[in-house]
Image (cartoon, grey):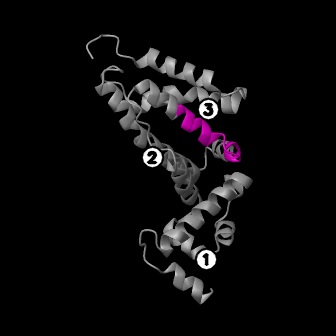
Amino acid sequence: MDPNRAGAESVGSRPGGRSERIRQAVLAAALSQAMEHGVANLSIKDIAARAGVAETTIYRRWGHRTAVVADAVTELAGRGNPPPDTGTLRGDLVQLLEQTRDLVTQPGMERFLGTTIALFADPDIAAARRTFWNDRLDRIAPVIRRGIDRGELRRGSEPHDVIETLCAPLYFRLFVTDKAIDARFVARCVEHTFAVYADRTGAG
């Protein structure tokens, strides 16, 4: 191993420091490789070569390839996509679905998502998929809870169920019908979600 590289990789994890730059390089490399070639063809060796780091750096921090990919996609989903807070749940759900649409329709993302579905039985990939979606759902859940507190959704609504109802039609279009995910479709998904979960009691 290049001693200069080894020294760089032993630096502590100072926020914004060299360790964080290495982490970002690895995540970017993993995401690019996964989008270009699919998860099935992803290897730690290729990620390391693309990121310009040693393979041991990746194994030490993440353990296996799918953990790297899960971390990379989680970061991608959160970057520039803060949980919306428009003041109304309807506005929040529209923005949330638009964020999701923009994320999954990025170049290469459909291939990436498709391979994770095709490799459903792979325990490492299944674990990475759960990690990503649980993190994403947990970040969004406060949006739904605010809507419940404002009386826009009925008490007892489970935030994860609400998000699933909102987003599931989008993935059906993406992977099954290949129809447009346009503004009209987004509005319809939001209206359907309200039809299922809206508070009809008038009690607030």
Give whichever of 167, 90 is nearer the camera. Answer: 90
Quarter of the image for the C terminus: give it.
top left
**Badge 1 density bin: few <14, some 14–19, many ≥20, Cα 10 Å:** some
Percent coordinates x, y for residue 63 in the rendering: 52, 66
Percent coordinates x, y for residue 198 in the rendering: 39, 17
Q: Residue furthest bottom?
A: 3
Q: Are marks 1 and 3 in contact (CB under 8 Å)?
A: no
Q: What kind of residue is marked 2?
A: Asp
Judging by the rendered image, the residue that carries numbered circle 1 is 54
Which residue corresponds to the image point at 35% horizontal and 25% vertical from the top-left? 157
Which secondary structure, mark 2? helix
**Badge 3 density bin: few <14, some 14–19, many ≥20, Cα 10 Å:** some
Instruction: Name the image quarter holding residue 154.
Output: top left
Quarter of the image for the N terminus: give it.
bottom right
Judging by the rendered image, the residue that carries numbered circle 3 is 171
Q: Which residues are magenta?
A: 97-111
